[in-house]
Image: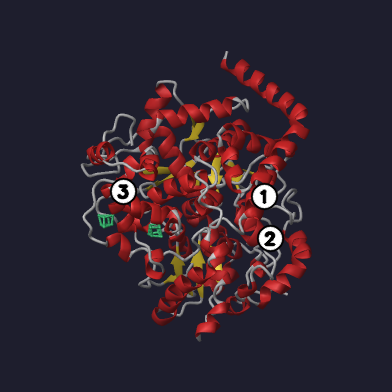
């Protein structure tokens, strides 16, 4: 992809089609790279695990953007986009190098922004919280047997012995034997992560689904701000000096 | 170190809109570096060249490895990062297990749509910068991170608007945009070191590995998300390549390409999908091969294969294939204790029958 690249296909559709969701989707610069016309050949569908089990089709995703049909787009925005497994098999196999995976990703972002994702993200609170307060996405504590009963009897055994087992495994590797997060990222690191979410506008977006989380993160940041900002200032000065 | 660029190779469409040509991202990075738009974290120390698509050479660093960890592995399959450390210790490779790194947050992004590209790319660039400021080569444990970093590099190199937004965020942290010369997954390193691993292996262990039959499965984000920078070309070879070097007999099965069913969000909230996809893969593996183990390189796939076999009893299937990561195999070959040093006891599909067959004591 290059900045000057023009894609006559997306440009033509852009200028002729309407609809709110459609316009929002077309603003994402990835769409230009993800659609180069569609043969309706179904190669993507044949390789799509979501299409095997759901009323969902990557061919339809590409066609609906080319058609600009707001009704189908809405149907996808309100539910079907969450069926996609984000496996990129469609992109890999498409003879036109289209990527329904990327189109779906752009649509998921918009669904969250537009407040359409509450149902899809129910049950996602713990992970979102961990990302924003620990800098990790997963912790041993989250893998409790009651949350994953289908993972079998060994999960129960593992869960009760995980502390000793981890201690044995990670002897001599500081920061690795923790259970409330994946590794013990430093406070300063977590603060940097939170600042990225804030500065990029991503934190605000989290507020459309989990408003309480935004409060938690902002309070956490305020508590640490003075000490952490002093550290950042030091870093900035060091960086400036290295440029001279 | 001199820097050779493999430029435009051949005339087919390569995702560049309607411009029909192939590009090597390294050439574009070099151009941006010359223009002062980005910095490149050039490789430190010795490297080995391996071929990716169109014959382009990818340089795999052989020393000074920044260990960018996988949250899924550390939480759920901790034997994998431990094995990654283990094979480096055995081969005398210097590495850095940094506690100032964060998750890549790509699992979150693909599962939930929370976050945005500026956030995702800034998190990537902050982690890259950590390796750069510490003087290490950035190397990656997780396939989700690997695919994400390949994509973030691609987008950052190709889109000035994104680049500028990310630079602004980084400036607020006292950091700058430094893109690694190579985006390297740990399984690519283990593959590049395969002869060294073989030479340093415990002969008794090799005896146990010899003739084991295995199938391999690669994470979709290892080779489908960005598919032009994968050692071996369009179909990955690193896991099977390492395993067969160590004496494993690699077998083919018809569903090798199919997604494991992890689905990022499905493994959490739609596991009936995960289980159904798994059943298709496992059925093909059983009917066509019935191997001693399934070899993987991806956090999500390793989790899915390991955790989703037991429940298949519900549909009358009895699967029992130990799931082993490439680095756990390497660690075993090098003499690691299967539980205390390779962490195979964290897997829920029993590994004991495999260890018995290999003649490795575990208790
Ligand atoms: S594989 Fe590509 S060209 Fe064929 S139907 Fe799917 S999107 Fe269209
Ligand atoms: S990324 Fe989504 S649409 Fe594409 S093949 Fe995978 S599940 Fe289907």
- Whichever of labels 1 and 3 marks the residue nearer the N terminus, that label is 3
Q: Chain of mark 2?
A: A
Confirm or deny contact between disc 1 and disc 2 (CB under 8 A). yes
Chain letter belonging to callout 1: A
One can see residue B81 in this view: no
| Residue B28, picture quadrant | top left
Secondary structure of residue under mark 2: helix
Judged from the image, the secondary structure of the residue bearing numbered disc 3 is: helix
Label annotation for residue A130: 1
Mark 3 highlights which residue? A65
Q: Quadrant of the N terminus of chain B?
A: top left
Marks 1 and 3, how far apart in space? 35 Å
Where B82 sits versus B118, above or below?
below
Residue A35 in view, yes or no: yes
| Mark linked to residue A142 | 2
Within-10-Å neighbours for mark 3: few <14, some 14–19, many 20+: many
């Amino acid at each position: 992809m290059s900045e000057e690249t023009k894609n006559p296909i997306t440009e033509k559709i852009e200028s002729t089609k309407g609809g709110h969701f459609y316009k929002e989707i077309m603003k994402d610069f990835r769409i230009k790279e993800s659609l180069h016309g569609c043969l309706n050949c179904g190669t993507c569908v044949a390789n799509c695990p979501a299409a095997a089990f759901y009323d969902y089709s990557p061919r339809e995703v590409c066609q609906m953007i080319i058609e600009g049909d707001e009704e189908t787009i809405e149907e996808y925005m309100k539910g079907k986009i969450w069926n996609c497994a984000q496996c990129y098999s469609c992109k890999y196999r498409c003879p036109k190098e289209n990527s329904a995976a990327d189109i779906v990703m752009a649509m998921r972002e918009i669904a969250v922004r537009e407040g359409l994702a509450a149902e899809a993200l129910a049950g996602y609170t713990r992970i979102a919280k961990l990302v924003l307060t620990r800098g990790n996405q997963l912790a041993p504590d989250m893998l409790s047997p009651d949350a994953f009963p289908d993972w079998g009897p060994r999960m129960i055994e593992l869960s009760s012995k995980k502390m000793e087992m981890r201690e044995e495994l990670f002897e001599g590797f500081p920061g690795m034997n923790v259970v409330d997060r994946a590794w013990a990222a430093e406070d300063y690191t977590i603060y940097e992560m939170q600042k990225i979410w804030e500065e990029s506008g991503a934190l605000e977006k989290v507020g459309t689904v989990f408003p309480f989380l935004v409060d938690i993160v902002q309070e956490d940041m305020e508590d640490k701000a003075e000490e952490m900002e002093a550290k950042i200032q030091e870093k900035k000065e060091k960086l400036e000096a290295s440029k001279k | 170190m001199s820097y050779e660029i493999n430029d435009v190779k051949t005339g087919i469409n390569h995702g560049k809109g309607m411009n029909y040509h192939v590009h090597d991202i390294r050439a574009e990075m070099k151009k941006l570096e010359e223009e002062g738009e980005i910095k490149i974290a050039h490789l430190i120390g010795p490297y080995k060249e391996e071929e990716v698509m169109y014959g382009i050479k990818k340089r795999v660093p052989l020393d000074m490895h920044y260990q960018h960890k996988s949250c899924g592995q550390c939480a759920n399959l901790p034997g994998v990062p431990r094995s990654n450390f283990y094979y480096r210790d055995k081969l005398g490779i210097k590495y850095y297990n940094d506690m100032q790194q964060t998750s890549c947050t790509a699992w979150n992004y693909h599962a939930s749509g929370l976050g945005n590209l500026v956030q995702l790319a800034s998190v990537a660039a902050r982690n890259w910068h950590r390796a750069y400021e510490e003087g290490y080569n950035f190397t990656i444990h997780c396939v989700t991170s690997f695919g994400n970093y390949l994509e973030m590099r691609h987008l950052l190199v190709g889109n000035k608007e994104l680049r500028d937004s990310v630079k602004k965020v980084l400036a607020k942290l006292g950091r700058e945009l430094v893109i690694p010369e190579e985006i390297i997954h740990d399984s690519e390193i283990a593959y590049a070191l395969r002869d060294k691993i073989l030479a340093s292996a415990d002969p008794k262990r090799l005896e146990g590995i010899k003739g084991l039959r295995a199938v391999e499965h690669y994470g979709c984000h290892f080779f489908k998300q960005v598919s032009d920078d994968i050692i071996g070309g369009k179909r990955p070879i690193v896991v099977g390549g390492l395993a067969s070097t160590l004496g494993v007999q690699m077998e083919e099965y018809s569903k090798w390409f199919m997604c494991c069913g992890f689905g990022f969000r499905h493994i959490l909230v739609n596991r009936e999908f995960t289980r159904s996809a798994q059943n298709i893969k496992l059925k093909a593996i059983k009917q066509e091969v019935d191997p001693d183990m399934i070899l993987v390189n991806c956090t999500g796939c390793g989790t899915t294969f390991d955790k989703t076999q037991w429940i298949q009893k519900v549909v009358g299937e009895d699967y029992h294939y130990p799931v082993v990561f490439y680095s756990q195999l390497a660690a075993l070959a090098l003499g690691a204790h299967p539980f205390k040093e390779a962490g195979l006891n964290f897997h829920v599909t029993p590994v004991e029958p495999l260890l018995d067959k290999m003649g490795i004591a575990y208790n």
